[in-house]
Image (tube, rainbow, N blue to C red):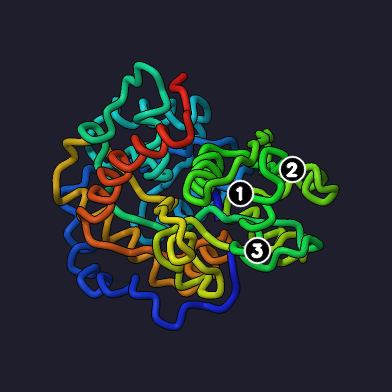
Amino acid sequence: MNHLTRRHLLAGVPAFAFTAAAPSVLRAQGAYPPGDIHVLCAFPAGSGADVLVRYFAEKLKPITGRTVLVENKPGAGGNIATEYLVRSKPDGLTMFIHAGNTLASNFHLIKNNPIDARKQVQIAATINKQAFMLVVDPKKPWKDVKELTVAMKEKGAKATYAYAANSGKIMGAMYKARAGLEAEEVAYKMAQDSMNDMASGAVDFACHDPQFGMQEFRKGTLRILAVASAERLTAQPDFPTMTELGYPMDLLGWFSAMLPAGTPTPIVEQVNAWINKVHEDPETAKFLISFGGEPWVTKVGVGQQRMLKDIVDWEEYVRIAKLTPS
């Protein structure tokens, strides 16, 4: 899973631009069939993703006036939950809150993938943006990516870096390729598992998820040098992007509310309006920022376009990182 954090509320999150149209849509629920809404989560209960999914599920209850149930279906990199979604009736009663970029990566990383997200998944509403982070131990002398790059070139093949998720592996591989480094990658089951090795110097730097990165940054146990999004996130304006520093990449993580393809347009629009309504609560912005990202509110269609772009981009990412489908 890819997860999310930082301080101050966004003074002008452009997110809320679309909520003005929500009331009329919220009243037009005739096309939505009666029944409980089942929200799928691709990760175990208590995980970071589960916390995010349950936050939105709880907020949807008073907005929809319905019972909203969360069903955890972990496994296969999210594909178990995705398969359940695409086999569900396209009536809006089964919703999947998940990372759109994960669907894009799975398109290339799962051998004989039974799911074609381009044809079988409809992104109804976007939820947040987040970006993986290039981090070092704060006791190290490197204050920015330029200093780190110089030091890693001096170390040559003895340089090392940590990762614990595919997006971290991709970020590290792209940095290596763009900077001309020979650093050896070191895989960890969890990001936390790399902390002792970073502190001891066994690994020089890491590419980790934003929730973990911001958590350790706030504690003073990690220094964040840059993020992997193409543009700086409003919620984290102090962190430069790898792109602006001369290492082009656009590894944007983003969660969304998904429905099976073929769901009638009025239902898709209704879900979009409901999710955008959740964003009107100031607590939602605080919550998403605390997870290392920022709110991302859009009209129907924007999320689908981003997923299609990511599917194309991930073909190159997989090639650069030399990942083998499994």
* Circle nearer the N terminus (3, 1): 3
Mark in the foreground, 2 or 3: 3
Does residue 45 appear left or right of residue 141 in this picture? left
Crowding at dot 3, Cα within 10 Å, few <14 / some 14-19 / many 20+, comes out as few
Element assignment for label 2: helix
Does residue 23 appear left or right of residue 276 in this picture? left
Element assignment for label 3: helix
The amino acid marked with disc number 2 is Ser
Q: Quadrant of residue 93?
A: top left
* Circle nearer the N terminus (1, 2): 2
**Residue linked to disc 1:** 208
Vertical placement of 132 versus 115: above or below?
Answer: below
What percent of the width, then of the height, locates residue 292?
Answer: 56, 61
In front of the other: 45 or 37: 45
**Residue linked to disc 2:** 194
What percent of the width, then of the height, locates residue 233?
Answer: 45, 68
Residues at discs 1 and 2 in contact (Cβ within 8 Å): yes
Q: Quadrant of residue 112?
A: top left
User: What residue is shown at x 49% (from left), y 25% (from top)?
Assistant: 76
Badge number at residue 147: 3
Q: Is residue 102 visible?
A: yes
The amino acid marked with disc number 3 is Glu
What percent of the width, then of the height, locates residue 241?
Answer: 48, 64
Label 2, label 3: how far apart the Cα atoms are? 21 Å
- In the picture as drawn, the residue positioned furthest to the bottom comes out as 11
User: What residue is shown at x 37% (from left), y 63% (from top)?
Assistant: 296
Label 1, label 2: how far apart the Cα atoms are? 10 Å
Label 3, label 1: how far apart the Cα atoms are? 19 Å
What percent of the width, then of the height, locates residue 148?
Answer: 65, 58
Mark in the foreground, 3 or 1: 3
